[in-house]
Amino acid sequence: MNKAMLALLIHGGTENWSPQRWKIRFDTACPGRRVVLLPDTGFDPAEVRYAAVWKPTPGELAAFPNLRVIFNLGAGVDALMTDASLPNVPIVRVAVADLTSRMTEYVVLHVLMHHRQELYLRASQRQKRWAPKAQWPARAISVGVMGLGVLGASAAIALARLGFRVSGWSASRSAIDGIECLHGDAQLDPFLRRTDILVCLLPLTPDTRHILNRGLFAKLSRSSPMGAPVLINAGRGGLQNEADILACLDDGTLGGVSLDVYETEPLPAASPFWTHPRVVVTPHNAADTDPDEISKYVARQIERYEAGEAFENVVDRTRGY
Ligand code: NDP
Ligand code: OXD
């Protein structure tokens, strides 16, 4: 065992994401390397070169003076960014095909659910009511994807393939075949005005916190056959103003909502989202990535680094994503 040490700091994982399961996985993925699962006092923190983390406690990573890199075990790094004592080393986030295709499935599922009036149809079924409503084609609906990164771009392409009119919005200019790409603050309003179903796959940063609010919902298109616009948020709960979402559903500014993420997770039992007839609640599992894929991805990145190559998918710390 003379390979540099990897420390695991994992909080909040259950079942397949439990800390012990990660330890077994990394032992398998990193043969010949000492992998320590914290808390553990039986090692010298100065020997740790690599850390793989999920929601580490602020200050925990500062204990390793010779750290070379932090691997975030998810795509979003917002939880990590709140740590003021984060060591000044590269942060590598997860961008793997397994995660991307699962998120694309989630987005397609929920766009289709609203487009095909599934909430109405399921309510009819519970009431044993045979009452079909007029249906319209995908090309009658404009979907707007906020965030055209790894996840947003893949979802946008899949939706366009199904026949939806798709546009996307990002911070900087992007170009994707078949997708109308807008960017920056100046193009946010034109993007919203053409959007019937808004899909949010933005990262949570100081610039995007509470971007999903009443002012934004009021700018969405109201001319689709659905009558009122729909919101689908699988980015982060901090992107949304939850009181605004509920008020906008109740006054008709929004027609329906699918949420995978919330300001407080797990979603408290008292949240009105649970029982609202026009809200679809999922428990932050839009892209419940296969942890085996993630541990192999981290092991590959360590091998690349030790062979003198650059890390992939490094977070830009000034942008916060
Ligand atoms: P990327 O970093 O690849 O993409 C982020 C996109 O958001 C980019 O297009 C970026 O613009 C855009 N963006 C960032 N800030 C702004 C802004 N202020 N204004 C406009 N556009 C902005 O991230 P991913 O696609 O990999 O992931 C997105 C998010 O999805 C993650 O951060 C995470 O929060 C969430 N997620 C949720 C999961 C779930 O299960 N619910 C699972 C995995 C991720 P530009 O291209 O110009 O940089
Ligand atoms: C992630 C997530 O960021 O699962 O990967 O939310």
Image (tube, rainbow, N blue to C red):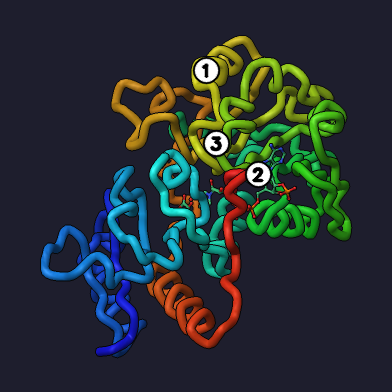
Residue 121 locus on image (x, y percent): 56, 36
Q: What's the residue at 11%, 69% (across, down)? A: 42
For residue 249, above or below residue 174: above
Q: What's the residue at 65%, 44% (across, down)? A: 111
Residue pointed to by mark 2? 111
Residue pointed to by mark 3? 258
- Give, as a three-letter code, the residue at label 3: Ser
- Give, as a three-letter code, the residue at label 2: Val
Residue 247 locus on image (x, y percent): 55, 12
Spot the residue most to the left.
42
Residue 38 locus on image (x, y percent): 20, 61
Which one is in front, 220 or 240? 240
Residue pointed to by mark 1? 246
In the figure, is residue 278 to the left or right of 55? right
Q: Earlier in the sequence, mark 1 or mark 3?
A: 1
Inter-mark Cα distance, 1 to 3: 12 Å
Which one is in front, 177 or 210? 210
Location of residue 212 by image quarter = top right
Which one is in front, 228 or 146? 146
Number of labels in the image equals 3
